[in-house]
């Protein structure tokens, strides 16, 4: 009888432990109900790293190998457009400055070459004027990290700022943006090998201050703004052909933000609210193109707009940007390491 009682006690204790573990896993996977990701913060949280040597906003960023390049933007205190380029070494946690842009721009679109054309940094478009969204350029600027030399490549023929740039193999996709204050549906591709631009299918929804990523040969365009309002629009284009297709909207409409791919997901970070009294956006959300579902992730420590966003492995980096809507600046660098269980799939 005593042995049977002991077995019953151990059985009940084991069942309670299993239920508790299941509840914890469900809570972590769901992300909780709090703005910063709820119970997910027990295993995933943003951490502040060594700040950038520059205080900027309205920048662009992309990663090549272990280095994240942070390009252009406005600098404190007077919204001067800068040509400076900072480089963050993910392995050592150190910063350095590299050769400046040939053409200083704010609101640039930045990407690293992909596939057989990986290794170089590309900066497209942007505004050249100080303190305003004017002086659009169609310039494509390339940086070779091995030589430290910038080259100005052929322009696209459509000057615009606040666009997005995404690489699929040896093709660069310049998506959306604005010209003369008007949001555009324009999409152009640049063939790195031939050095030629061509037209691509236009977006269904015109927008600027958007973000885009490429995942498995598909280009995803997120959010942005038009006519003074933030958009929650998501569109997807197969790089092999076809037209843009609508996908489930971003849970938090946003513009002036960044996005990066992580294990087949697209993670969107930052932005600003455009309504009167609006704030910068803390919420961070991830989209799975396979299931077309969104998931909440922990919010940033310091919400910002006009920031740079890049990823390496399971880490997402949020770089510089303005902590308040409008003309504000920071040198802030934060990183989120996302546990594998928060992002399902193989």
Image: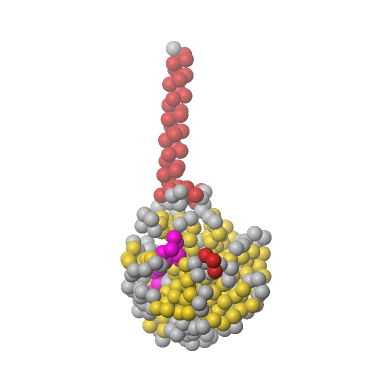
The image quarter containing residue 253 is: bottom left
Q: Is 91 covered by the magenta stretch?
A: no
In the rendered view, would you say 160 is above or below 97?
Answer: below
Taking 263 as reference, is 68 left or right?
right
Q: Residue at x 53, y 55 (%)?
A: 314
Farthest top residue in view: 1
The image quarter containing residue 234 is: bottom left
In the rendered view, would you say 316 is above or below 210?
Answer: above
For the residue pair 335 and 263, the one nearer the viewer reads as: 263
Q: Position of residue 329 (x, y in %)?
A: 55, 74
For the residue pair 345 and 242, the one nearer the viewer reads as: 242
Quarter of the image that includes the N terminus: top left
Q: Position of residue 54 (x, y in %)?
A: 62, 73
For the residue pair 153 and 137, the one nearer the viewer reads as: 153
Q: Residue at x 61, y 79 (%)?
A: 150
Q: Residue at x 48, y 79 (%)?
A: 196
Taking 143 as reference, is 4 left or right?
left
The image quarter containing residue 210 is: bottom left
Taking 78 as reference, is 164 left or right?
left
* Residue 280 shows in this picture: no
* Residue 4 shows in this picture: yes
Check the image and tell me how it is coloured: secondary structure
In the rendered view, would you say 334 is above or below 208?
Answer: above
Q: Which residues are magenta?
A: 213-225
Characterize the magenta stretch by its predominant secondary structure: strand
Q: Position of residue 18 (x, y in %)?
A: 44, 34
């Amino acid at each position: 009888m005593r042995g049977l009682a002991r077995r019953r006690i151990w059985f009940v204790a084991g069942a309670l432990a299993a239920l508790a573990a299941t509840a914890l896993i469900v809570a972590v996977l769901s992300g909780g109900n709090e703005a910063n990701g709820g119970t997910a913060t027990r295993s995933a949280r943003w951490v502040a790293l060594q700040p950038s040597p520059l205080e900027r906003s309205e920048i662009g960023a992309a990663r090549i190998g272990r280095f994240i390049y942070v390009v252009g933007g406005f600098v404190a205190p007077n919204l001067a457009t800068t040509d400076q380029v900072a480089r963050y070494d993910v392995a050592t946690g150190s910063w350095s400055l590299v050769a400046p842009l040939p053409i200083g721009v704010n609101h640039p679109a930045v990407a690293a070459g992909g596939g057989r054309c990986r290794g170089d940094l590309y900066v497209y478009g942007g505004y050249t004027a100080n303190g305003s969204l004017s002086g659009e350029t169609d310039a494509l600027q390339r940086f070779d990290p091995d030589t430290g030399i910038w080259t100005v490549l052929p322009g696209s023929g459509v000057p615009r700022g606040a666009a997005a740039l995404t690489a699929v193999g040896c093709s660069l996709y310049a998506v959306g943006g604005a010209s003369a204050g008007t949001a555009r549906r324009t999409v152009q591709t640049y063939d790195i090998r031939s050095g030629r631009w061509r037209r691509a299918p236009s977006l269904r929804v015109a927008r600027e201050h958007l973000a885009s990523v490429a995942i498995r040969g598909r280009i995803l365009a997120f959010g942005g703004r038009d006519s003074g309002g933030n958009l929650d629009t998501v569109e997807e284009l197969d790089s092999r052909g076809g037209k843009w297709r609508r996908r489930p909207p971003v849970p938090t409409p946003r513009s002036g933000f960044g996005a990066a791919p992580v294990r087949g997901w697209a993670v969107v970070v930052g932005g600003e609210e455009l309504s009167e009294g609006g704030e910068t956006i803390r919420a961070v959300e991830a989209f799975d193109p396979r299931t077309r579902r969104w998931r909440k992730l922990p919010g940033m420590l310091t919400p910002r707009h006009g920031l740079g966003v890049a990823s390496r492995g399971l880490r997402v980096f949020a770089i510089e940007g303005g902590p308040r809507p409008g003309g504000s600046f920071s040198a802030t660098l934060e990183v989120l390491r996302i546990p594998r269980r928060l992002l399902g799939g193989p």
